[in-house]
């Protein structure tokens, strides 16, 4: 039968839909493994791609590990196997100088709020030949060409995928965020995040026993660092850091399968942005030290 290929580091948003598709169609869902450094195992990919592979779904950057996979190489291999490539770029948009054409993807999705815009607004970019083949997931007003009592014909792309009243307020609010990113420049954003990530990895390595997740090189990841502290539970640590004025997230970050593979139930994630300073990283490290002293007595 047909096969869908995802990765073990996917956000649930790029995993659960494929679980449902596999259930509905009888397709087999397979997963690209990671190497010990948290990078996609391309040798493992070689053994998984085949003539039955219909879809390859992967993130442009992991929301837990920060890993940036070699998209162009993976999409090239997928095309050779005759598969479509679907990219979740939520963690890469606004961080990396990402070009839809250069990724080689057939479909690419991202959200506005990861680009300093409003919540509740998302985008799907696709090759016309692929979009024309897709049936609407949702039906309703404004996505039809004609309706009869017993049938309907869909509007042209992209309108057929936009049923009902759109989020007009969010759509109007997003362009200024894009203007800001364009003014700063994504190359500059990237340099800033690499510098902060390198500094954070160095500072966090000074904390004995702290396990930093993901690749060791700052150039191999986007601007986030997740870690597990065996001395303090992630939720306790996040709550304590909040009291110190340091905002982090604790939990499985909508990536439960990945955390099971890592052998931990949850982790703490610190994310960097255009407004983050090295002093913020210092506050994070000092806060972890204080939390350890508080909880360990």
Image (tube, rainbow, N blue to C red):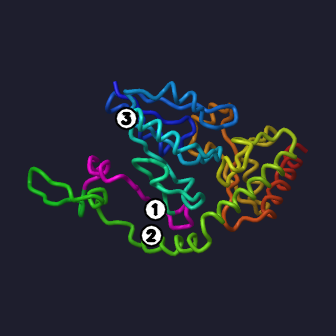
> Does residue 150 appear left or right of residue 206 in this picture?
left
Whole-percent x, y for residue 276 in the image? 72, 64
Circle 1: element type = loop
Residue linked to disc 2: 170
At 77% from the left and 56% from the top, the residue drawn is 241
**Which one is in front, 69 or 150?**
69
Q: Earlier in the sequence, mark 3 or mark 2?
A: 3
Q: Which mark is residue 120?
A: 1
Q: Earlier in the sequence, mark 1 or mark 2?
A: 1
Residue linked to disc 3: 82
Q: Which residues are magenta?
A: 113-139
Quarter occupied by residue 56: top left
Q: Is residue 119 above or below residue 130?
A: below
Inter-mark Cα distance, 1 to 3 = 34 Å
Q: Quadrant of the C terminus?
A: top right
Q: Quadrant of the N terminus?
A: top left
């Amino acid at each position: 039968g047909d096969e869908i290929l995802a990765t073990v580091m996917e956000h649930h948003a790029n995993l659960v839909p494929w679980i449902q598709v596999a259930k509905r169609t009888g397709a087999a869902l397979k997963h690209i493994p990671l190497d010990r450094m948290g990078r996609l195992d391309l040798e493992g990919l070689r053994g998984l791609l085949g003539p039955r592979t219909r879809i390859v779904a992967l993130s442009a950057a992991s929301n837990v590990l920060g890993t940036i996979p070699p998209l162009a190489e993976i999409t090239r291999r997928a095309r050779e196997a005759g598969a479509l490539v679907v990219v979740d770029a939520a963690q890469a948009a606004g961080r990396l100088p990402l070009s839809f054409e250069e990724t080689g993807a057939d479909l690419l999705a991202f959200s506005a709020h990861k680009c300093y815009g409003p919540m509740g607004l998302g985008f799907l970019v696709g090759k016309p030949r692929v979009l024309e083949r897709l049936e609407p997931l949702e039906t309703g007003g404004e996505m039809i060409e004609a309706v009869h009592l017993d049938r309907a014909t869909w509007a042209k792309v992209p309108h057929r995928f936009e049923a009902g009243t759109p989020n007009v307020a969010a759509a109007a609010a997003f362009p200024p965020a894009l203007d800001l990113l364009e003014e700063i420049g994504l190359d500059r954003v990237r340099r800033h995040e690499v510098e902060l990530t390198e500094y954070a990895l160095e500072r966090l390595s000074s904390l004995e026993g702290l396990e930093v997740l993901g690749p060791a090189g700052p150039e191999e990841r986007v601007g986030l660092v997740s870690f597990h502290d065996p001395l303090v539970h992630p939720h306790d640590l996040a709550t304590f850091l909040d009291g110190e004025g340091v905002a982090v997230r604790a939990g499985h970050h909508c990536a439960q399968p990945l955390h099971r593979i890592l052998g931990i139930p949850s982790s703490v994630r610190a994310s960097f942005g255009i407004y983050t300073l090295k002093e913020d990283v210092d506050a994070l490290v000092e806060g972890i030290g204080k939390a350890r002293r508080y909880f360990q007595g």
